[in-house]
Every structure is written in C-alpha cells, then in structure tokens.
C-alpha cells in the first residue's frame, strides 16, 4: 500500500530486482482475508489458499507497483552479485516462487478477491 514499509523501501531505492524476477506472487487484500477467515470458521476443516486470483511474476508487478506509487523502477542486480549482500533467500524469493491457487477458497469460502490496483488489465 502507498505509505507502507515496502513502499518506503522501494521509494528509497532499497529494493532491487534480482535476476529475471521469475517468481510468481499471490497477494490478498486484508478485507478479503478477513472475509475468508470468518467464512472458514464454519467451513469444512482443511487447508485453503486465501490469495488473490491474479498470480503475477515479480518482473511484472514490481515495476507496476513502483509506477503506482510514483517512484523509479528498482535497479537490476545479477543473481551472483546479490547472493553475498542480500543472501540466497532473496535470490530464491525473487526467482523461484510459484504462486498459489485459490480455487478451493473461492468455491468453499466464497472468496471473491479484489483485483490488484497497481496492475492493469
């Protein structure tokens, strides 16, 4: 969200795009998560992916988010060069995540997540 910690770090140039940015992220708005949590209280026991319906690659969402909050694109950083100062976890999280499928939460919990405001289309 604009004004949040991530936005502040991005605007300050403290976030870099590592490698190709191939990770796929799933997001959720807090109000959608709250609705699903309430619905889960009376739902069948099980695991539910309470995420949006727009899994999106980091290489797409990070520049769009930067534009949405009005800051510069994050700099690119080679994976090898990032491992030292940023750690292997940062490289993994920016290039290896696969996103999540919310089908079960939509069908059973009635999850109807809103669209990401910073993505067009």
Image (cartoon, grey):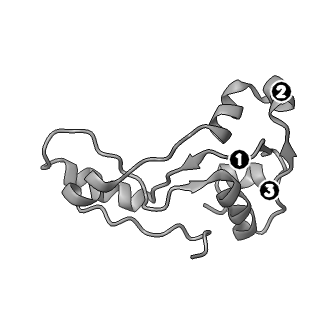
Q: Nearer the viewer, residue 112 or 95?
A: 95
| Residue linked to disc 2 | 85
**Is residue 29 toward the left or the right of residue 43 in the image?**
right
Q: Secondary structure at mark 3?
A: helix
| Residue linked to disc 1 | 21
CB under 8 Å between callouts 3 and 2? no
Q: Of circles 2 and 1, which is in front?
A: 1
**Is residue 34 toward the left or the right of residue 108 in the image?**
right
**Residue under the image location 30 percent in, 55 percent down:** 103
Quadrant into which the N terminus falls: bottom right
Q: Position of residue 8 (x, y in %)?
A: 74, 53
Q: Give the CA distance from mark 3 to mark 2.
A: 20 Å
Q: Nearer the viewer, residue 69 or 62?
A: 62
Earlier sequence position, callout 1 versus callout 3:
3
Residue 11 — which label?
3
Count all numbered tags in the image, as a single digit.
3
Q: Quick check: 13 above or below 115?
A: above
CB under 8 Å between callouts 2 and 1? no
- Residue 3 visible to an observer of this rendering: no
């Amino acid at each position: 969200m604009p004004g949040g910690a991530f936005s502040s770090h991005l605007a300050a140039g403290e976030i870099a795009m590592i490698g190709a940015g191939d990770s796929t992220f799933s997001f959720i708005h807090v109000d959608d998560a709250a609705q699903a949590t309430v619905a889960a209280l009376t739902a069948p026991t099980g695991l539910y992916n309470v995420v949006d319906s727009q899994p999106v690659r980091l290489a797409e969402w990070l520049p769009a988010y930067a534009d949405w909050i009005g800051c510069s694109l994050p700099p690119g950083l080679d994976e090898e060069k990032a491992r030292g100062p940023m750690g292997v976890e940062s490289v993994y999280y920016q290039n290896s995540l696969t996103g999540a499928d919310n089908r079960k939460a939509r069908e059973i919990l009635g999850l109807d997540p809103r669209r990401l405001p910073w993505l067009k289309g």
